Amino acid sequence: MSDLTHFDENGNAYMVDVSDKDITKRTATAQGSIAVSRDVMDAVTGKKIKKGDVLTVAQTAGIMGTKRTSDLIPMCHTLSLNNAGVSFEIDEEACTITAVCTAVCEGRTGVEMEALTGVSVALLTIYDMCKSVDKRMVISDIHLVEKTGGKSGDFRF
């Protein structure tokens, strides 16, 4: 078997078999940011975007993204999430919005991809809802902050 866990010795992609792994509680938190113009920041914080309350819609979209991760990432296992949440940290002075997503399950594989997908979808939703004000938004620094559970143990960035 190859050192790459999603490829066999012939280079064919496959889903890793996790059936022999123990079921444990697993959590993952990811975050990422979007830099926006002053006009976008004022419109978001003043709830003046015509499509609706940007952060509420982005929060809902991020949670929905966690639940659809295996539909988007080909070798990702379908998980039954126990919880998923998205929150935002707004830095009005720097004109940045940071999305933080935490996902939780009891299963045989981790929820890192679900947390990362939740953050990505939340930030993309902010972009989509605000692009009519200014398209020069920059999404960046999407990364895993921490994870717990599983054979590999805990991780903190």
Image (cartoon, grey):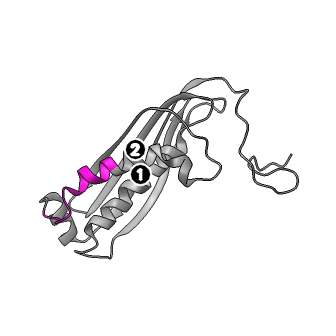
Q: x, y percentage for residue 96?
A: 29, 61
Q: Which mark is residue 81?
A: none
Judge left or right: residue 32 versus residue 126.
right
Q: x, y percentage for residue 37?
A: 25, 71
User: Residue visible at 61% across and 23% down?
Assistant: 23
Judge left or right: residue 157 versus residue 126.
right
How many numbered markers are drawn? 2
Q: Which mark is first along the chain, 1 or 2?
A: 2
Q: x, y percentage for residue 68?
A: 48, 47
The amino acid marked with disc number 1 is Val
Q: x, y percentage for residue 132?
A: 24, 75
Residue at image mark 1: 119
Residue 37 seen by the camera: yes
Q: Is residue 98 above or below residue 153?
A: below
User: Residue visible at 23% across and 57% down?
Assistant: 54
Pointers 2 and 1 in contact (C-beta within 8 Å): yes
User: Residue visible at 69% across and 27% down?
Assistant: 21
Nearer to the camera, 21 or 50: 50
Label 2 residue SS: strand
In the displayed orientation, state which residue is furthest to the front: 71
| 113 in magenta | no
Real-space CA distance between mark 2 and mark 1, rounded to the nearest whole angstrom: 6 Å
Q: Which mark is residue 101?
A: 2
Label 1 residue SS: helix
Boundaries of the magenta span: 48-60
| 57 in magenta | yes
Judge left or right: residue 135 versus residue 48.
right
Crowd around label 1: few <14 · some 14–19 · many ≥20 (10 Å): many
Residue 30 seen by the camera: no
The amino acid marked with disc number 2 is Cys
